[in-house]
Every structure is written in C-alpha cells, then in structure tokens.
Amino acid sequence: MERKKIVFYSGNLAKGGAERVIINLATALLAKGHEVVLATSVQLKEEYPVPEGAKRLVIYEKAEEASGNRIVNFVKRYRKQRRIWKEEKPDIIVSFIGKNNAMALLTTLGMKIPVLVSVRGEPSQEYYNRALKLCAKYLFPRAAGIILQTEDSKSFFCSGVLKKAVVLPNPLNPIFVEDEKKPKAEEESKNPKPRRITMMGRVDANKNQKLVIEAFGRLAPQFPDYVLEIWGKGEERERLLNEVKEAGLSERIFLPGTTQKVKEKLKASAIYILSSNTEGMPNSLMEAMAMGLPVISTDCPCGGPRTLITHGVNGLLVPVGDVEAMTAAMRQLMENEKFAQELGEKALEIRKTLDPVRVNRKWEEYILSCCQG
C-alpha cells in the first residue's frame, strides 16, 4: 500500500473524545508506514501524548499573534494555515469538529489538497449558528469525504453533502480489547470495597452529571456501600462540588478531576453511567462496555448510545434529563447484581464489533480513497 502523508487537524489535543480518536488513528496509521502530522490551532497544557513518529504542528504558537479584532485574527489565521498547508504538502487533511472543518475547507480553496471532514457530535449543536450552517451547506460538498458518527446525524445535512458522507465507528483503544475483565462478584466479596459508580468526561452542562448526582442522592441511604466518582474537569465542577457538600454527600460523591488511569478506574467500577444531553459516539461508554461493565446511558441525540446499547440486553437507556428514569435504572442495577453482571457480559461483545484493527482499517481505506492520485 502506498505511503501517504496524512494531516489530522483539530483545535487542540486536550483530553476529549475526538482527540482520543485522532491519537488512536494516528498511532495505527504510523504503524502501517504512513507519515502523520498532528496540526492544531493551539496547544494546551494537558494534552494526549503525541505518538512516536508523528509530527506536531501548532498554528498559533504565540499569544501576541492574536489581536482584539476578530476580522484581523481571522485573516492572520487564514494566511498562516494556507502557508502551513503549502509547506507541508499533505496528501490529505482530515479535520475534526465544526469551526475546524470550516477552516480546513476555506484555507485549502484553490489548492490540490483533499480535505476529509469529520462531524463528531450532534450536528445541530456542532453547526449551531448561521455561519457554520452555511459552511455545512455550501463548503461540505467541496470536501473529498465526510465522516459522520451515526445514521441519525444524516438528517441534518442536504443531499449534496450526503452523497459524500459515510458513517464510521470510533476505533477502541487497543488496551481495552486485551483479555482482561472486571473481577467476578465472588472474587470481589473476598476483599469488599466500596461499590463504585463511575462517570468520565468533561464536567459541563451538556454532560449533565447533575442528573446522576440527584439520582444517587435519592438512593444513597438505601445503598450505603456505593459511592459515585465523576472524573473530569470543566466549568460545572466547582458548582457541583458545592452542591454535593450542601447535600451532605462529600463522603459518597467524589469529583477528583482528571486521571491518566482510565482503564484502572473502569476496572475498579461496578456501574458506568453517561448522562449527556447530546453525544456523537461516546468513547467513554465504548470503553466501559469493553471492560465488561453494566452501563446506563441517556438515549441522547444523535443516537450514539442507542447504536451501542440494546436496552435490557447489554445496557440500559433512559430518556434525556429524566431523573426518575435514571434513579430507577440505577436502582435496578444496584439491587440486582446478577442482572448487572449479565448486562456487563453482553457488553463485552463490543470488543468484536469495534475491534480496533478492523475499525482502523476501515478508516485507513476511506482516507486513502479520498486522496488524489
């Protein structure tokens, strides 16, 4: 297979779902002999490590390059990105998320560089204003290819876009398909520990961790051996910490921040919960299922959780924002550990359907099909 130079372009490499997919894909493509460049608008303090062999590019390396004038900033960014693309001469640019997709398409106009755009979340949220909607309508048809997360997300786009669109799953990180499961209930009983309900992701309004905190608060007196751990940072974290304190649950609900030991935290968990208002294809949910955890998720647009979970078979789905339904689902798993274990065992099958070797091959084939020549 011919070696290609592939640029992945995003806002940054901070610890989010899209960024995790980029790192996983970059690692896989490097192993196949391709040249990989990770280009971002900015660089943040806490980012995923760059895979060995990949080149890292930061478009805005100096804060003084930005002025207070939005038009001036746009022109500077536009010119610099065009210059970078000319210097790098990639075979293809694979961009991720809203504004980055727009900039990738705009800054390559007139160049013979194919651009593949990836829509990661609920499209109406990702393309939320008039400018971005116009981009999706008029610029996307110029893309060499368009990657969507779910079949449901297709309803947002016009026919001209859909002609070039394909739905591709996220690849699991290989560490989550290793032959290692959560200890069985009888093994855990020999060394009893607090039963952990785990959540992972940015702590913000969309992730709606408040819903689970409220549901757990209702159940806490009846299930004294359970604790709730919410991993991640975000603008809602301090407010939620205060609410937990005021509710007298500081010894039962924890928001410890970020962790590098995702697999270890999942392995030590009894239940995993996703409570988002909207999601694309949630990596954290995929990883929890791959670890054999019983999972609960909101049935949120654009249908990612529904794609992964068959309700009552390999997990539970509840309506968005419904605290009564969330409480009932949590109670069901906390009361009936046999049922929870059965869900977790079925959830393990995601290792086969989202096997990273198979999924990475699909991405590679699609990326190469969009390259010129």
Image (tube, grey):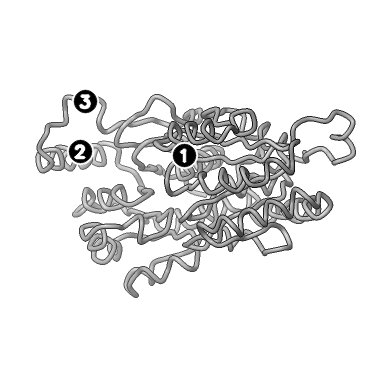
Secondary structure beneath dot 3 equals helix
* Residue 167 against residue 211 in the figure, above or below: below
Query: What is the crowding at mark 2: few (fewer than 14 residues within 10 Å), some, or many (at least 20)?
Result: few
Where is residue 95 shown, x and y percent of the image?
Answer: 36, 48
Q: Nearer the viewer, mark 1 or mark 2?
A: 1
As drawn, is 26 to the left or to the right of 160? Answer: right
Q: Which residue sits at x=47%, y=39%?
A: 202
Amino acid at dot 2: Arg
Q: Label 2 belongs to which residue?
A: 83
Secondary structure beneath dot 1 equals loop
Mark sitting earlier along the chain (1/2)? 2
| Separation of marks 3 and 2 at Cα, in angstroms | 19 Å
| Separation of marks 1 and 2 at Cα, in angstroms | 37 Å
Residue 268 badge: none
Residue 63 badge: 3
As drawn, is 339 to the left or to the right of 17? Answer: right
Amino acid at dot 3: Ala
Query: What is the crowding at mark 3: few (fewer than 14 residues within 10 Å), some, or many (at least 20)?
Result: few
Residue 203 badge: 1
